Amino acid sequence: MTMKRVRPPGILPLELWDLLLPDGSILWDYMQSSQFGDLLHAVISQTWHGTAMTQSEGKVSETIRHFHTLYLTGGGAPAVLEAMKQGPWQQNILAKDTTFGAVAGGQHLLNAHDLRGWVLDVGQSGFKISDDSTRLQSARDWNLLPLREDVLTLDINEQRIALRQSLAGLLRQMHEATGTWPEAIVTALPSRLDDQGLPEGSSYAGMEGDIHLIPDAMKLAGVPEVPLFVLNDAELAAVSAQAEFDLPGPTLVLTIGFGVGGAFIRPS
């Protein structure tokens, strides 16, 4: 497989899942809490003012302060929309499809290369795949693919095999549903990626450093040799925002799902 790391121009990926709260805890700790919407509003307001801090990277880049638009996507986005309405930014935009939020961006990238293909969204609670008319998803099997911290180091290779098999299964289902193979695949991964597409950490044991994950899953599924484009999930969400909306100014993109992902769209 020919794999290319895509870095969409004007889009800056952000680590916002561990934004610090006043009591020293982090945003991630409250993902399942009834307080989450209000806490998210508080830390994103701090981000707008240029005072937000993350546990892992310190102060959030002031490049994004005073952003104009907040774009929300992901399965948890509708639930926090009301809480985010009174922010200092100018407007909120909810993705047209918060569940399959990667589709518009993935198809935009494929169209830019004059290719017809699939968009594979590797989420932390499940996987989604689509083309321009078919959409499939499968939930993460938590017994087969437990959280990273619950996996012994000796079991990392087994987890890598299990993740490949799970992704290959969805790819085969897509082939059965469409009756054809893609000309290319765009894949969004739930982790930071280096310039070669090497993933850093995520909730999946073994994803970190596994540059062959998606190519191997494609081979296992029987996908022919086609171009593979990889990028971070929030980056692809930002491409979707640009593809679906006329954004009037700097935009902060938040993906609300298993955790919080972020990207910043600089003004052109």
Image: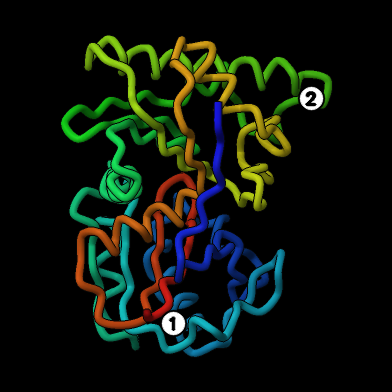
The residue at which mark 1 appears reads as 45
The residue drawn where x is 68% and y is 46% is 200
Q: Position of residue 7 (x, y in %)?
A: 51, 57
The residue drawn where x is 46% and y is 42% is 188
The residue at which mark 2 appears reads as 152
Q: Is residue 258 above or below residue 11?
A: above
Q: What numbered label is drawn on residue 175?
A: none
Q: Nearer the viewer, residue 261 or 121?
A: 121
Q: Residue furthest front?
A: 114
The residue drawn where x is 54% and y is 87% is 50
The residue drawn where x is 53% and y is 44% is 190
* Secondary element type, mark 2: loop
Q: Is residue 9 left or right of residue 5?
A: left
Q: How many residues crowd around disc 1 within 10 Å: few (fewer than 14), some, or many (20 or more)?
A: many
Q: State the quadrant of the N terminus.
A: top right
Q: Amino acid at mark 1?
A: Ser
Task: Answer with the quarter of the image where residue 20 lies.
Answer: bottom right
Q: Is residue 169 above or below residue 42?
A: above
Q: Nearer the viewer, residue 231 or 227?
A: 227
